[in-house]
Amino acid sequence: MTSFFRMTNVKILHLSLLFVLVHACFAQADFAPYFFDNGPYSHNGNLALFSLSEDTAVGTQIYSLNGTDPEGQEVRYGLAFEPGSKEYFRVDPKSGNITLVEKLDREKQDSIEVLVSITDGRSKVVERVTIFVMDSNDERPEFQNMPAIVDVLETTESGSSIYNVQAVDRDTGSGGSVTYYLQNSQSSLFAIDRHSGVLRIKPGETLDYEKSKTHFVTVIAKDGGGNFNGREQFMSSTATLTINVIDAQDTPPSFIGTPYFGYVYEISVPGSEIYTVVAKDGDVGNPNPISYSLDGGDDGVFSINKTTGCITLLTHPMYLKREIFNIKVRASEVGPDRSFMDYGETTVVIRVVDLNNNPPTFYGEKGPQNMFELTMYEHPPEGEILRGLKITVNDSDQGANAKFNLRLIGPGRMLRVVPQTVLNEAQVTILVEDSAAMDYEKHHFLTYKLLAVEIDTPERFSATADIVIHLLDTNDNAPKFSSDYYIARIPENSPGGSNVVSVTATDPDSGLWGEVKYSIYGSGADLFLIQPTSGIIYTQPWASLDAEVRSKYNFYVKAEDTEGKYSLAEVFVTVLDLNDHPPEFNENFLEKTMIIGAPVKIEAVDDDAEEPNNVIEYSIMKADPNNIFDIDSDTGEIMLKSYIKSMDIVQNITRQKDCTWSVVVQARDRGQPSFSTTAIVKIDITEATQLSGGPLASFLMQSRDKPLQILGMLAGVISLMVVVTVIISTAMFMRNKKSNRILPNRRVKRRPRRQGWTLKNPFKKPENPGEKFRVEEEEEQEQEQEQEPEVTVENVNYNNNISNVVRQWPPPPPPCAPCLPPPPPRYIPGDRQWVVPTVSAAVAAKPKRKKEMTRQDTVNKALVSELKMRLEQKRMQNQY
């Protein structure tokens, strides 16, 4: 039966493999329908490993074929049998319901071969399945040696076995076990062993030929019971044994210690003693010698010593064809003339005991095999059976010695083996458990060890087999860039077609699926191109990069395989700045007014985009009449040399009446190569007088370039005054409240206003810059000022210092540190005004008469006009 199952499973696997190959050939045109494989305990699917009890009633719906079509077409089911075989089932083509139409009998046929089919009208799939017929307790025990007639000497001792009843039940399990009983056992002289069927004379009972020559013993053989038609049923049979009592003229030999049981072990060798029987003559007073002989059942593999009764083995246990030997041993009396007289017989049961001397063994289609290989595509569906592996495992031992576990050892938990526990023999099935891990890019092939280890034996024999699975690639990966973004730098003067950066993306798939094509897109990709195969990004042939116009570009690069799977990366391109712009002043001729102790600032601009190309260093190239200035090379602030503290020192240096210098300033950038430009700065040096405001005016003078600081100071003073006012008001209110009296209003006497210096609002826009701050004296003092000679110097101030300065001649002494306001100037009749330079303008009086034009002023005006004309010409040339 085991061989039949093995051949059946092999046929099923062959047909399944053929179906898979046919299905793969037409998969692109039309996917064939397929059955659901729901396992052996399901009542719908493809009938795989389905079993059916033999007591199932005819007309019962036993199963439902269940499948589907990948395209969703309606499927039809079919069922067929081998030619000449009996058709037990019928199937409904639409629903797939299978109905039993013929009575089953496991004892006649324990398995049924069925061809089940499923079709969608275009493709048809046929599978061969085996339906196993399960046993039910429907067979009665059958006697093998009954009815029978036996002769028994009347001198047979009580308790002696006289017959061995044998009955067989063709059912399996408990329904196939047989137990023996005697009918009316209470009144009988005999007893039977319930398990072995050995019939004996009851202890204490003897046979008496004169009382009864014949005894009829009815033996009942009953099975162990089992299920039948949904209920438990016990079956039994009866047979009659006729016992003839033999009248004995003397007492024959009898065996002692029966029944006899001996054992042959697999390690026994020829000549090994198996068992020794002992018989003696019944005539105790004058016994005869006993001679032993074998009377059948030994198959020629055992022998007995005639004198001692020792049974020995004649051959190796491997050549024994049965597990149990019932050997008949005869003990005969030897008369004085060496002839045999009465004899006695007994049965010696010798059992061949199995030893655990066979390890599990794996078999392929051609016999024992320890290497199995399979080729398949990566990522198969989880739960799929690897049908290309035809593996059988077997242990030739019996019972517990043939029970072992199966384990699959290999990378990860991708595969699973069933069954996990085997008794004697099983077909090994490998299932997919983790489809994602079966990746061609990670493993071109998988190697597993199939391990079979015995469970309940001290030897723990084991066997291994190698399973090698070769994976085939599919397009399951998208190209992947070596980086999520790329940073490139290119000089701004690079010609069109210059390489910018090379991007790299790899697709781990093989063949055409691993080929990658590149493309770029995005708002910043207009000036760039990419080679589709190499991934080199270069500029357009007509592209002109200018860091001053745009220094940053970013766009996306796309890597795509032949089936459209893609990935993206971002490219950042920085246009490197080159030193291609020289520094430029706003004008090549600048006019500045410098107050002693305060610098003037000039500024040039470099249009380059990055440092150090746009970092400017300032230096004084020439000063006329001589150089009394220092310049900050970083900020461009021009200041007097440290030893010049007053106008007296300046006038001692120059012989001219006006303190005007022409300074040639160079602005040079720090790029490579370095560019420079020069400008002529006309600096008019003057000296600030002490402000009538004292420390406040000094503060304003010092903070002329910091308007926020002035506002902050004013806000702080106002806040302090408000707080003091609130505190004083609160204190007075509390004092008045305590004294509970009302204070009269105080009369404020106004003193006559003393005519002094007047400080106008510096934040009110004047009609001309000289009127921001003005100090006026009384009209009498103004008349005195008209009588004094005065010198007015007009200058253009680009540093927001002074536009007009009116100085008294001769000049007053140098101012001291700010403290109290200086005393009023000496009264001189005439129109006289005092002016103070401020942060944003100059204090100047309205001149009463024009200054006479000197030759130096004429030269300066001519130089300015010429420079303006050249600048205008250069601007027009640049436009064309």
Image (cartoon, helix red, strand yellow):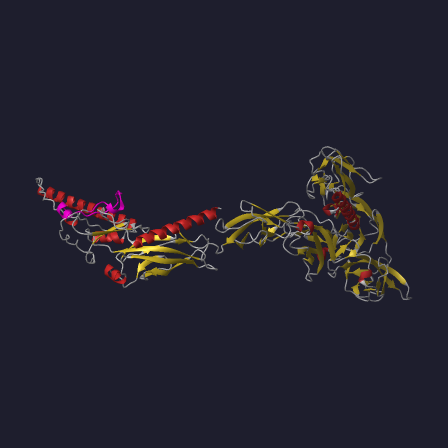
Asked whether residue 68 appears in the rendered view, the answer is no
Specify start and end residues of the magenta stretch as a single range.
759-783
Counting from the top left corner in percent of width and height, residue 41 is at 68, 43
Asked whether residue 362 appears in the rendered view, the answer is yes
Q: Is residue 416 magenta?
A: no
Camera-nearest residue between 807 and 157:
807
Q: Say if 120 sits above or below 763 in the image.
A: above
Dominant secondary structure (helix, strand or loop) of the stretch shown in magenta: loop
Q: Is residue 762 magenta?
A: yes
Side of 825 relative to 98 (left or right): left
Camera-nearest residue between 16 and 638:
638
Counting from the top left corner in percent of width and height, residue 599 is at 31, 56
Counting from the top left corner in percent of width and height, residue 558 is at 59, 47
Side of 508 relative to 247 (left or right): left
The image quarter containing residue 44 is: top right
Residue at point 9%, 42% (across, down): 748
Number of numbered tags placed on the structure image: 0
Counting from the top left corner in percent of width and height, residue 135 is at 74, 43
The image quarter containing residue 813 is: bottom left
Residue at point 44%, 59% (across, down): 670
Camera-nearest residue between 870 and 813:
870
